Amino acid sequence: ADAMDLQVPPELEAKLNRTAAQTGRTAEQVALELLANSVEYDEWFRSEVEKGRLSAKEGRLLDHEEVRSRINAK
């Protein structure tokens, strides 16, 4: 498979370079770490949304009062 070749806009590249300089890493390392975290978060978020949809389909939605009492209990 060919390596991915991303075209990074100059202003984004400048920000990556700044962060890299501040953290002693390369701009590519910074970009890859941010990308990995973002993809992991996106996968997690989608799975949480799906869990919520399944719960709703099974009629396990909390009603408004129950939510309020749970929040007040904290």
Image (cartoon, helix red, strand yellow):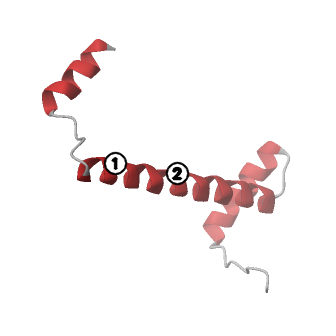
**The C terminus, quarter of image:** top left
Query: Pointer 1: what residue?
Result: 52
Select label 1 or label 2 by which is in front.
Answer: 1
**The N terminus, quarter of image:** bottom right
Marks 1 and 2 sit apart, C-alpha to C-alpha, by 12 Å
Q: Residue at x 55, y 51 (%)?
A: 41
Q: Nearer the viewer, residue 17 or 55?
A: 55
Outermost top residue: 73
Mark 1 element type: helix
The answer to whether 44 appears left or right of 64 in the picture is: right
Query: Pointer 2: what residue?
Result: 44
Mark 2: amino acid = Trp
Q: Position of residue 6 (x, y in %)?
A: 69, 77
Question: Are the residues tagged 1 and 2 within 8 Å (C-beta)?
Answer: no
Q: Position of residue 27 (x, y in %)?
A: 78, 59
Lower position in the chain sequence, tag 1 or tag 2? 2
Mark 2 closeness class: few <14, some 14–19, many ≥20 residues within 10 Å: few
Q: Residue at x 65, y 60 (%)?
A: 35
